[in-house]
Amino acid sequence: MPQIVVLPHVELCPDGAVIDADTAKSICDNLLDHGIEIEHACEKSCACTTCHVIIREGFNALEPSEELEDDLLDKAWGLEPTSRLSCQAMVPADEDLVVEIPRYTINHAKENH
């Protein structure tokens, strides 16, 4: 079973985390299932960028992003070459991921889910 290593995030995961990932779910769903309350303002419908993450290790094991995701990522705060929308990136079966959640999103106010 692959793991997702979440790097420390001041608000969402101050100590970082290592979670056993479900390969049938997206990165976003795996984080939420393990108590890491990543924003997902569009309810994971690929319509915003609030669940933006940077894949620090394991990026090449992910399926390529689709055009809609790429278009949205252009609007994300702190975009990097290994950025993905966590609601669209499925956990690979054969490789661990190291994920950084950016400090900021494009939301001016956070929504409680």
Image: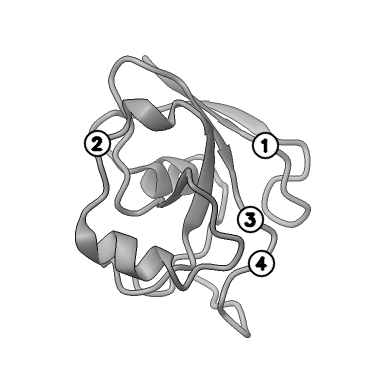
Residue contact between numbered discs 3 and 4, judged by CB atoms under 8 Å: yes
Q: Gap between marks 4 and 1, in whole Å?
A: 15 Å
**Residue 49 circle label:** none
Residue 36 is left or right of residue 51, and the answer is: right
- Please report whichever mark, 2 or 3, sits nearer to the chain's N-terminal start: 2
The amino acid type, in three-letter code, at marker 1 is Leu
Q: Gap between marks 3 and 4, in whole Å?
A: 6 Å
- Residue at the image point whose x is 62% and y is 85% from the top: 108
Q: Residues within 10 Å of mark 3 (few under 14, many from 20)?
A: some
Residue situated in front as seen by the camera: 101 or 67: 67
Q: What x and y, as percent, mark residue 107?
A: 56, 80
Residue contact between numbered discs 3 and 1, judged by CB atoms under 8 Å: no
Residue 16, located in which quarter of the rendered image? top right
Residue 33 is left or right of residue 12, and the answer is: left
Q: Residues within 10 Å of mark 1 (few under 14, many from 20)?
A: some
Residue 85 is left or right of residue 78, and the answer is: left
Q: Residues within 10 Å of mark 4 (few under 14, many from 20)?
A: few
User: Label 3 belongs to which residue?
Assistant: 102
Q: What x and y, as percent, mark residue 69?
A: 29, 61
User: Label 2 belongs to which residue?
Assistant: 63
User: Label 1 belongs to which residue?
Assistant: 7
Relative vertical location of residue 30 with respect to residue 3 in this rendering, above or below: below
- Residue at the image point whose x is 23% and y is 65% from the top: 68
- Please report whichever mark, 1 or 2, sits nearer to the chain's N-terminal start: 1
Relative vertical location of residue 37 with respect to residue 54 in this rendering, above or below: below
Residue contact between numbered discs 4 and 1, judged by CB atoms under 8 Å: no
The amino acid type, in three-letter code, at marker 3 is Pro
**Residue 104 circle label:** 4
